Amino acid sequence: MSDNSPVTKQTTGEEAALLPPVDVIENASGITLYADLAGVPKDKLHLQVEADTLTIEGEIDLEMPEGIEASHSEVSVSRYRRVFTLSKELDATRVGAEFKNGVLKLSIPKAEHAQPRKVEIKVV
Amino acid sequence: MMYRSLFPRDVLAELNRLQREMQQGFHLSPNIRGIARGGFPAMNVGGTPQSVDVYAFAPGIDPATLDVQIEKGVLTVAGERKLEQPGEDATVHIDERFAGRFRRVVTLPDDVDPSAVDAKYRDGVLRISIGRKQSAQPRRITIE
């Protein structure tokens, strides 16, 4: 890492990573998550669901001419990483993923038993 | 309505990000066009003896709607990012992604050739490569 890099190595042993901005929207059928992962090709995107933890990781891979020297850089780390905790009413086994133009769209449906049900109120 | 409790954020990651942003803030040199950092799209600029390369991190945009112009040594990237609107019955828990119109401006070095421009959009990154003028390129002089 060069001296003028504003990013310092983290002491936790984990590599420095960018936190991708996300939108999370919920409706009756489930949750939709959008994440901005610009510069990540499809084969360098890694999604993992383990127990109730969803991990989104991606490696930026840009086509760069040989001998390029940076004069201004706002994206100085080449890795994205973000972790979410899923709640138990979500069905992690049926997560749908689409990835296009650097935008990841994840659809996480609600488990069958957690679908909304109208509660009838009996008047006695 | 905003509920932020469903997906508790990674506090350590957030603190690290804040720390990084603060450190980056100290490296900031005053720019006549205001604070350049933190805008959309994020930009990296680099160069080789043959070209100047600008990378704009603009995911999820139809490249046909992007407007790239070079005028008087200034490169402008403008456009609009439209996001899918949540339905009527939907609840937005996290809303961080940029939406709306944007415009960013980069001052180019004096030796670029505005007619030798190549722009590509791949994986959400717009790469603009501008050639340098032939006369400005280093030339080896042979001694006879």
Image (cartoon, helix red, strand yellow):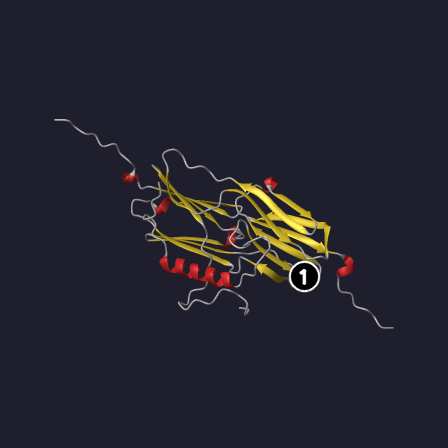
Q: Is residue B116 above or below residue A115?
A: below
Q: What subunit carries mark 1?
A: B
Does residue B135 appear to the left or right of A48 in the view shown?
right
Image coordinates of residue A106 in percent, x first then y, are: 42, 45
Indicate the secondary structure of the residue bearing disc 1.
Answer: loop
Q: Quadrant of the N terminus of chain B?
A: top left
In this view, the residue in front, A28 or A50, is: A28
Q: Is residue B51 above or below residue A89?
A: below
In this view, the residue in front, A43 or A87, is: A87
Q: Residue furthest left?
A: A124
> Which image quadrant is residue A12 in?
bottom left
Residue position for label 1: B48
Does residue A54 appear to the left or right of A5 in the view shown?
left
Dot 1: within a 10 Å radius of its alpha carbon, few (fewer than 14), some, or many (20 or more) residues?
some
Q: Tell me the residue at 43%/67% (across/down).
A: A10
Q: Residue furthest bottom?
A: B144
Image coordinates of residue A96 in percent, x first then y, are: 42, 44
In this view, the residue in front, A38 or A51, is: A38
